[in-house]
Image (cartoon, rainbow, N blue to C red):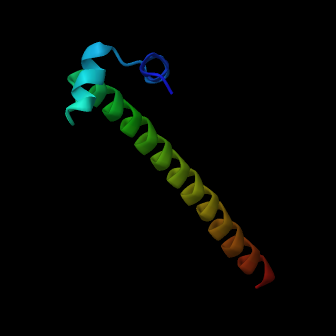
Amino acid sequence: MQDQKLMNYFKFDEADLQANRNGQVTGKTKGAYDQGFKIGRNLGESVALLFLFIGLIGFVMAIVARNRRS
């Protein structure tokens, strides 16, 4: 893949590309990484809360069903 195609795909500019070649990370690249990390973290927390809520509903339904039998 050519450098220009990579730069377009990853939205890098020449400074980002040069820093990458030198094994460094620019502030812009770090900001994009941090933003992606935040989105992933928020998504993970949302999914965990959803499963917790579903589990809580199941637990309450089990208690209600048990009390109805008694």
Does residue 2 appear to the left or right of 22 in the view shown? right
Does residue 25 appear to the left or right of 39 in the view shown? left
Percent of width and height locating residue 27: 21, 24
Task: Name the residue at 51% across, 27% down.
Answer: 1
From what the image shows, is residue 47 above or below residue 19? below
User: Image quarter for residue 40?
Assistant: top left
Percent of width and height locating residue 7: 42, 19
From what the image shows, is residue 3 above or below residue 51? above
Task: Name the residue at 76% across, 85% down.
Answer: 70
Q: Nearer the viewer, residue 31 or 52?
A: 31
User: Image quarter for residue 10?
Assistant: top left
Task: Name the residue at 63% across, 58% down.
Answer: 54
Q: Nearer the viewer, residue 20 or 58?
A: 20
Percent of width and height locating residue 43: 49, 42
Residue furthest to the bottom: 70
Percent of width and height locating residue 52: 55, 59
User: Image quarter for residue 68?
Assistant: bottom right
Number of marks in the rendered image:
0
Does residue 5 appear to the left or right of 55 in the view shown? left
Residue furthest to the front: 2
Does residue 13 appear to the left or right of 52 in the view shown? left
